[in-house]
Image: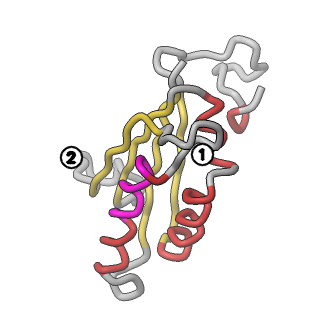
Amino acid sequence: MSVTHCLFLKFKPDSEVTREAKAKTFLDLLGLKENCVHPDTGKPYMLSIKGGIDNSVEEGGNKGMTHGFVMEFASQKDRNYYIHDDPHHLRLESQIRALMEDGVAVDFTPTIFYDWASPDTNGAKANGKK
């Protein structure tokens, strides 16, 4: 089953991070779709990526996040490789961390709303691990 990876970022103020640095970061993030290649096939494995600046209607609903990105992977295995091992992602992640004040990542499998094996009352998995 596919996995959707959502990334929400709060960049440092413009006085600390230039627009050019942010623009390069956005282009680099969007470029991950072509630059992240599967270690066995040598082909890109990210199915899609899109992102943009927050334009929430409800004031404060974004919890301070300024930008959002959504990536789709064919499987948990591909998503896990991306998060833990992909050199392009890991290099960009360290660059982004230097520019951001805060961030949130949420991953999900479409149509799976509960992990019935979890002892949590809401069925959520701790840290995405069983």
The answer to if 112 sits in the magenta stretch is no
Q: Secondary structure at mark 2?
A: loop
Q: Secondary structure at mark 1?
A: helix
> Where 15 falls versus 67 (above or below)?
below
**Label 2 belongs to which residue?**
57
Point out the frontmost of discs 2 and 1: 1
Picture quadrant where residue 94 is located:
bottom right
Magenta stretch bounds: 26-34
The answer to if 32 sits in the magenta stretch is yes
Give the mark nearest the N terminus, 2 or 1. Answer: 2
**Label 1 belongs to which residue?**
82
List x then y, in percent, for residue 52.
28, 53
Q: Amino acid at mark 1?
A: Tyr
List x then y, in percent, for residue 18.
33, 83
Q: Residues within 10 Å of mark 2 (few under 14, many from 20)?
A: few
List x then y, in percent, for residue 24.
35, 72
Instruction: Looking at the picture, tell me which residue is in the foreground, 13 or 31.
Output: 31
Position of the N terminus, as image quadrant, is top right
Q: Residues within 10 Å of mark 1 (few under 14, many from 20)?
A: many
Colour basis? secondary structure
Position of the C terminus, as image quadrant, is top right
List x then y, in percent, for residue 3.
52, 28
Q: Amino acid at mark 2?
A: Val
- Locate residue 113 relative to residue 64 in the image: left or right: right
